[in-house]
Image (cartoon, rainbow, N blue to C red):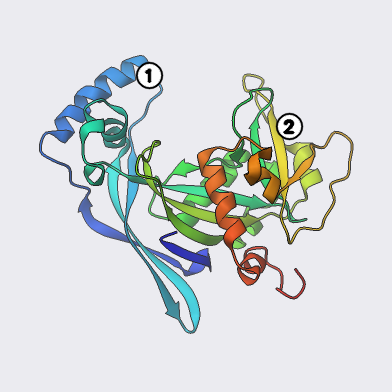
Amino acid sequence: PLACGPVPLDRVKVGVAEGERSYPAGTAAMADVHWSFATKEEPHLSDGPVWSLVSQEVQSIAGESAMHLSLQRSTYKLLLYTHFSDEGSLMPKETRCNACGLTPLLLTSDGFILLCRNSNSGSPWLTLPASCIMTAPSVAGVVAATLREVGPSLGDATVALASAHLLAVAEADDDAFDGLRHHLIVSVRLSVSAAEIQAGINEAVPESKAPRELQFVRHGQCDAAIAGEGLPRSVTLESALGGGLDLSVSARRALLLFEGLSHESRAQALLVTAAAS
């Protein structure tokens, strides 16, 4: 990781770099052409702001860790062109959009890490909520928006947001296949248990959408047991990372980061004392 926490979100300060991200001459015009074709094939596409990470710095304020992030604005249109077009693939990686993403790592009140996928899809397991693009220069704002999208099954969103910690700023591999060069990995401790989430996760899913399947991951500081009819089995963190689960790239990155946290850092992210964890 480029920087490690955990740092509570109220001590994560975000600055906005002056102006919009600059690109080589002609890029904007080519992006417009690419966008015109892309929207014909996928009419649902919508342009809007995306934010790239310019710099990150861990600081100490009154003896406590803080993190300062500098973000710069660009657009989804330019992200799509510079990362997903034939011409964009020829651009040096440092001249592409290289947007910043956010991966929420949710932990239930009884300590399980929460993963999700569409039922019977056979697709890789994702974090719930899934990773997303930073569309606003506010870490707390983007986390809050992702929690709202999942709905009330995650419990009190205000309580969850107050628990959030920035665990790390990570950099993608050279290819940044999804257009996201950097990733903010944020832990959130929920006020509801694994059993409560399982019971309510599909209540508000529209009929047009596939129901969601959950997977609970037990780590070394989680000694709870899932009990209840119809609940999915839990797996250990070691098993999930060792091939027991087909994980998405972002989910694997987040779990590896969590696995590498010290005993004290895990306890801080879990909102428990190290002695009790």
Front residue of 159 and 50: 50
Q: Amino acid at mark 1?
A: Pro
Structural crowding at the residue carrying mark 2, measured as other residues with C-alpha within 10 Å and reported as few (<14), some (14–19) or many (≥20): few
Which residue in the rendered view is the most extreme toward the left? 25
Front residue of 202 and 107: 107
* In the depicted structure, whether residue 207 falls above or below residue 191: above
Q: Secondary structure at mark 2?
A: loop
Q: Is residue 209 left or right of residue 85?
A: right
Label 2 sits on residue? 203
Q: Secondary structure at mark 1?
A: loop
Residue 246 coordinates in the image, percent (x, y): 62, 35
Tell me if residue 236 can be seen. yes
Residue 248 coordinates in the image, percent (x, y): 55, 37
Residue occupying image coordinates x 73% and y 44%: 216
Tell me if residue 161 can be seen. no
Calculate the distance from the C-alpha at mark 2 to the C-alpha at mark 1. Answer: 29 Å
Residue 223 coordinates in the image, percent (x, y): 81, 58
* In the depicted structure, whether residue 190 falls above or below residue 196: below
Label 1 sits on residue? 43
- Splitting the image into 4 quarters, where does residue 82 fall? top left
Q: Amino acid at mark 2?
A: Glu
* In the depicted structure, whether residue 52 falls above or below residue 230: below
